[in-house]
Image: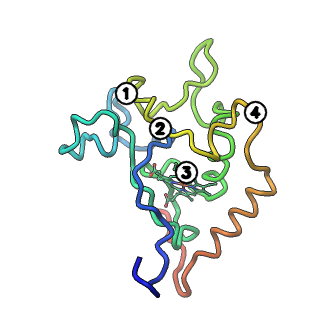
Amino acid sequence: MRRGAFPQFTDRGFVALGAPRNAAIPANADSKYFDLGLCGPLRTDLAAHTGYCGMFKTPTLRNVATRSVFFHNGVFETLEQVVRFYQQRDVHPELFYPRARNAGAAKFDDIPAAYRANVAFDAPFDSAAAAKPRFTDADAADIIAFLRTLTDAGVVRAPRE
Ligand code: HEM
């Protein structure tokens, strides 16, 4: 980053977080349709690189508190929902994914089973082994308070369409 430049608040990495499927997206009415980010179908140049399927660019967190939808498919509408996903995805996946019959929560329901191994388990994920989240509800409130400090002066909250 250029010295003195404003911070970007992103590492510009491409990562699969396994965001829940968003039923409000018309294309998702087709259960065989999946937006897999880097490997398509909208992007075509990396279609053969299946290790990239499900990966999306980490967006800047600058002004994140002014957004009304979060993640590539807009499945979450509040920062509270997003931070809860990071806290609970691997401990209580049933909070985010529909239950598969007799099999608990079907995790990563917006990625075909063949590509689910691409999903990241970096901290704060992968808390299932400890059977408890890596951060507390009080920590979550602190994280949200911090995210709210990343808003530039004069930037107003985007209205929901
Ligand atoms: C507690 C730690 C974290 C917090 C508070 C956090 C916060 C956020 C927020 C608020 C968003 C939504 C931004 C938007 O849609 O405008 C986001 C998206 C994203 N974050 Fe994180 N993040 C954390 C950890 C991580 C980690 C560990 C990774 C990578 C392994 C990561 C990668 C991403 C990616 C790829 C997206 C975009 C996902 C998509 O569009 O589907 N984040 N993060």
Q: Nearer the viewer, mark 2 or mark 4?
A: 4
Find disc 3 in the rendering and name its residue: 76
Residue flagged by tag 4: what amino acid is it? Ala
Q: Earlier in the sequence, mark 2 or mark 3?
A: 2
Report which quarter residue 12 is drawn in.
bottom left
Q: Earlier in the sequence, mark 3 or mark 4?
A: 3
* Residue behind label 4 places its C-beta within 8 angstroms of ligand 1: no
Q: Nearer the viewer, mark 4 or mark 1?
A: 4
Q: Earlier in the sequence, mark 1 or mark 2?
A: 2
Find disc 4 in the rendering and name its residue: 130
Labelled disc at residue 21: 2
Spatial distance from mark 4 to mark 1, Cα to Cα?
34 Å
Q: Earlier in the sequence, mark 1 or mark 3?
A: 1
Residue flagged by tag 2: what amino acid is it? Arg
Q: Mark 2 packing: few (<14 Cα in 10 Å), some, or many (20+)?
A: many
Q: Earlier in the sequence, mark 4 or mark 1?
A: 1
Spatial distance from mark 3 to mark 4, Cα to Cα?
26 Å
* Residue behind label 3 places its C-beta within 8 angstroms of ligand 1: yes
Labelled disc at residue 31: 1
